[in-house]
Image (cartoon, helix red, strand yellow):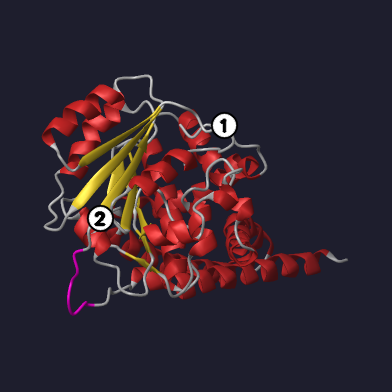
Amino acid sequence: MPAVYWEEIVFYVFAAVTVLQLFYYIWFFGRLAFYKSKQKIQSQQHPVSVIICARDEDENLARNLPGVLVQSYPSSFEVVVVNDNSFDDSKYILQELKKTFKSLNVIELTQEAKLISGKKFPLSVGIREAKHEILLLTDADCVPAGEHWIEKMQDAYDDSIEIVLGYGGYHKTTTLLNKLIRFETFHSALQYLSYALAGIPYMGVGRNLSYRKSLFLNNKGFSSINHIPGGDDDLFINKLADNRNTTIVLDKSAMTRSIPKKTFSDWFRQKARHYTTAKYYKPKHKLLLGLYFISQFSFYPLFILSLLLFKWEIVLILFGIRLLLQAIIYYKTMKRLDEEDLWPWFLFLDIWMFFYYIIFAPALWKKPRKSWN
């Protein structure tokens, strides 16, 4: 085949990939960027059970748990901490906190669940021991961004809502690794929150997630995914969330923050463990996520090839349209998720995602660890 045809083929593939990217930004991500929460005629104050599982988290419990216990919430709430076979000083820290905070309910686990992987067993114990219908989940290394976290998350419920998705971000520092971690977290939230707004919810994150206890019990908890390490948040939501029973909360005081990993190797192990569950998503979710991944991964290589082989003016016009739309969507969503300091870096960070996919792609096929911490 003459070379001229290859030049045109490369450009047409680049154009198709660009159009696909524009579709995702307009149809999905634009919903989050321009989202306006519905004004409720009357706010409700449901009793809430906050569930936290901890294993050897004494420092995190001492640092973060008071931020959960001192929440400003006029209705009743409890904080259930499941101390899962810890060997550190978690037990003594929890005992001291319980002297001050009567809302703290501590469950000490001293035996392992041999046939249940990950933290699904301690989480199931915490949920079954919870006194209230509305459950609010977070991790020991997370702290609420504001004192109205419980109030804002529970207020999203009505008669039809069974699942509420929140944003769990990371504390900000000036390091490059911190920006890479926070952008990846933002990018994941951009997808799962946008998909939920489009009526196709596919996951939530255990750092900030709420659902009804009855939903958990009526669907036999994690029984269908007990053999899978991880998945206590994303696979559970993937199985049960739909366009009628799921909503999101974007109030900045309803977010959580945690300390990100300090080294690239620690971050790699964390993300590798998380990505092992993606293969179990529903086919429609894997299709949508796969098409987006292919379009994003191939965009910059095809852009460079088209720039070299085809009419550079046309190539730059397509690139500019995508860049402009991306800049608007990223600015509005980063501002909404309190990550606006990342916006000046967005082009660099978007290019970085090409290398990110190469580095983390093996995690999709790697056998996961059974330990959850």
Residue that mark 2 sits on: 48
Label 1 crowd bin: few (<14), some (14–19), many (20+), radius 10 Å: few
User: Does residue 210 appear in this view?
Assistant: yes
**Quadrant housing the C terminus:** top left
Three-letter residue code for mark 1: Lys
Q: Main secondary structure of the magenta part?
A: loop
Instruction: Determine which quarter of the picture holds residue 217.
Output: bottom left
**Quadrant housing the N terminus:** bottom right
In this view, the residue in front, 171 or 365, is 365
Q: What stretch is highlighted in magenta?
A: 39-45
Residue that mark 1 sits on: 114
Residue 178 spot, x, y in % from top left = 36, 39
Residue 255 falls within the magenta-colored stretch: no
In this view, the residue in front, 106 or 225, is 106
Q: Is residue 247 above or below residue 181?
A: below
What kind of element bears circle 1? loop
